[in-house]
Structures are given as C-alpha cells and as structure tokens.
Amino acid sequence: MMEIDVFTLFPDAFGWFATQRHVTNALARGHALGLVNYRDHTPLSGRQVDDTPFGGGAGMVLRVDVVEAALRARYGRDPVSLGAVRRVIALDAGGRLLDDALVDELRQAPALTLLCGRYEGFDERILEHFATDRVSIGRYVLAGGELAAMVVCDAVLRKLPGSLGHADSAVEESFSAALQGGPEYPHYTRPAEYRGWRVPEILLSGHHGRIAGWRREQSAMRLSRHEHRPGNGPLP
C-alpha cells in the first residue's frame, strides 16, 4: 500500500483534494494520505516556523530545526536517515521536472513524504540533509508547495490500481510508455456530427485494429508538432 504524508503550513488546503473520486477510491483500498502541520511541532514560541535569511534580502525562510522537529515527531527517527525507508520530496522550483517517468518511479515507492515550502522557500540544509529528491511541477514559482504537492499526489494516486473507474484509463494516456512518450490522441463522443464538424470515419468503423493504428499515428503527429514548436528545445 502507498503511504503519502504532506508536510505543510496549510493542511486545510487539501480538503477539496481529498474528496476527489480517484483519491477516495485510493484511500478506500488502503492507501493513505496524511497531513502534518509544521506549526504543530515547532520548538519555537508563538508557533514560529520561519525566519529572515542570512545575508539579507526579502522574504522569510522555512527553518531547518522546525522541519526536523516535524519529521521526528511523525516518524520517531533522525530525518537524516529517513531516506532509507521512504522518499522525502521537497517541492522546489529548481528541482527535477515532474513527468510521467518520474510519476512511475514514485508510485513504485512504498512511502512518500512531500515537503511544502512557503514564503522564500527552504533553508538549504533541509534540501541537503533531509530530502532525497527535489521536484518541480514547472519552471515557475508558486506562493507555496501545496498546489505542487496536490499535483504530485494526484499524478501518483491515479496510477494506483483501483483508483480510476477503468483499469486501462491510466495506461494509454499522454506521455505514457504505451504512447512512446507522446501526447494522447484525439477523443470524440456523441453527436457524430455537430455544426458540420464530423467525427473521423475511422472511429465509427468498428475496426479496432485500424482505430488503434490511427490513434498511434495521431499521437505521433502531436508529438512531432510539439517538438518543433519554438521554445521546446532542450534545457541548457
């Protein structure tokens, strides 16, 4: 069973997420989603969790002693050794970009811990000594890691058996191995014609082999168009 813990200053932000069908399905099957508030375990007075950065500058930085206290309270061990039993992921704008291959990696792990930053981010010692991974959902900055944590949880949980209504729903989709990393092919439903816009005849043919071939071709075409768009070159 998968166990995911999210460390955050705003556990209430996950209320809506926890009600989503694929999440409730996963939890009903024995997977777990835990929420830990840093403030509940801070050793500092006034429930303080952050401080001004050494060297000056705007913003506040999440303190290393606060994160250690929260991790120790949750797991009863030195956070430095936590990576031996679970992946500890800091949601960090400069981290490894989340993609389908990384999601497949994460869903194989027995347990995940997601660390949400806030304000100016993490004290670097949290990243160096407690985190096993740094993950980014895109090359932009959010006010905190909560939305990024939901994205990671959503992507992982929906791949677990029984989370989706149909077992094949998470197999042949955008960027999956089944589509060789390409975007998903087009989908159509009723009506077959609307305002003169017709569904491709191949999809109405009932010939499953030809339909499968057409879908692979469409996925490959979309991938080719994506790769040739301006700005989609490799990162330096």
Image (cartoon, grey):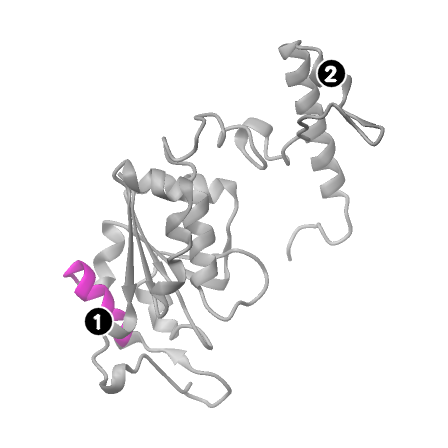
Using the rendered view, name the quadrant where residue 183 is placed: top right
Residue 125 in the magenta stretch? The answer is: no
Vertical placement of residue 94 versus 19, above or below: below
Name the side, left or right, on which 166 lies relative to 24.
right
Residue located beneath label 1 in the image: 69
Q: Amino acid at mark 1?
A: Ala
Q: Majority secondary structure of the magenta segment?
A: helix
Judge depth for marks 2 and 1 and give the one in front: 2
Residue at (59, 61) in percent of width and height: 139
Around disc 2, counting alpha carbons within 10 Å, would you say few (fewer than 14), some (14 to 19), or many (20 or more)? some
* The quadrant where residue 124 appears: bottom left
Q: Is residue 5 left or right of residue 153?
A: left
Q: Nearer the viewer, residue 149 or 178?
A: 149
Eyeballing the image, is 63 above or below 99? below
Q: For the residue carrying disc 1, how many other residues have a C-alpha within 10 Å: few (<14), some (14-19), or many (20+)?
A: some
* Residue 102 in the image, given as x and y percentages of width and height: 46, 44
**Residue 72 falls within the magenta-colored stretch:** yes
Q: Percent x, y for residue 136?
A: 50, 58
C-alpha gap between disc 2 and disc 1: 60 Å
For mark 1, give the secondary structure: helix
Q: Measuring 31% from the left and 79% from the top, which residue is drawn there?
A: 49
Residue 179 appears at what percent x and percent y? 59, 29
Viewer-nearest residue: 214 or 187: 187
Which segment did they paint magenta?
Answer: 66-77
Q: Could you say whether the residue bearing mark 2 is in a helix, strand or loop?
A: helix
* Residue at x-position 42% and y-position 36%: 159
Residue 105: mark in rendering? none
* Foreground pick, 196 / 126: 196
Name the residue carrying label 2: 202
Q: How far from the left and from the top, in percent, is residue 189?
A: 66, 27
Residue extending furthest bottom?
56
- Residues 226 and 234: in front is 226
